[in-house]
Amino acid sequence: MPSLLELRSEHAPLLLVDAASARIQTGLLGSTPGSDRWAESEAEAGIGIFTCLASLAIDLAMVRALVFCDGPGSILGIRSAAMALRTWNVLQPRPMFRYGSLALVAHALNRPEAQIIADARRDTWHRYIIGRGLQRVAAAELFGPLIMPESFRHWAALPPGVVTTPYRLAGLFAAADRADLFTATDSPDAFLHEEPGYKTWTPQIHRAP
């Protein structure tokens, strides 16, 4: 798993798209942090992603690699970003990389004792702990310092004692540029703890009792 420093060295300029939170963030990242340009949008992902691209006046033909957040976070937003990446890569193939939102926050904060969390629905929570990775757990299994990225939607009541931390990519990546956060991918999509299962249905002719 490469770090951002390695991606910069080998693939800059990079186009990064993150739609995991309610704030869409897009960056054009150069070989050094001083050359980075960022844009944000509060619009829904299908509009916000392209609003950011227009704001940065990005020429996609000049981009050498695509980077996106695969979650946890807004499934609709993440899949909108993934669809855009797949489309751009059909038009011009290039390396693609994914990273996790909670892993980025954890390594940027560098607090091994903390649990970085996000709502996973159905009374469960995504939890990332440095050294233990990403898990999905019940609320009763959460303990210790709990930190949730701001602008991440939640449907359940927040666990007691949880605090929020800014989810601003420029600062997070500056603090975690040496962490091994990225994985190459050929088919961008939203992160799932397991693939969905489907029950089969056998059709039957209805008969009166």
Image (cartoon, rainbow, N blue to C red):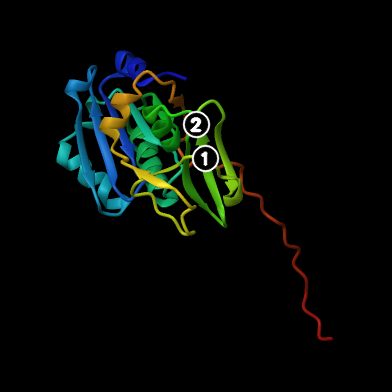
The residue under the point 54% across, 25% down is 131
Give the quadrant of residue 123: bottom right
**Horizontal side, residue 28 vs residue 81: left or right:** left
Residue 100: % across, % down: 44, 34
Residue 61: % across, % down: 24, 28
* Quadrant in the picture for the C terminus: bottom right
The residue under the point 46% across, 59% down is 155
Give the answer, above or below, for where 19 lies relative to 157. Answer: above
The residue that mark 2 highlights is 113
- Per the rendering, the mark at residue 144 is 1
- Which badge, 1 or 2, comes first in the chain's sequence? 2
Looking at the rendered structure, the secondary structure element under dot 2 is: loop
Residue 107: % across, % down: 41, 27
Between residue 84 and residue 73, name the one nearer to us.
Answer: 73
Label 1 crowd bin: few (<14), some (14–19), many (20+), radius 10 Å: few
Give the answer, above or below, for where 164 lies relative to 63. Answer: below
Q: State yes or no: discs 1 and 2 in contact (Cβ < 8 Å).
A: yes
Q: Amino acid at mark 1?
A: Gly
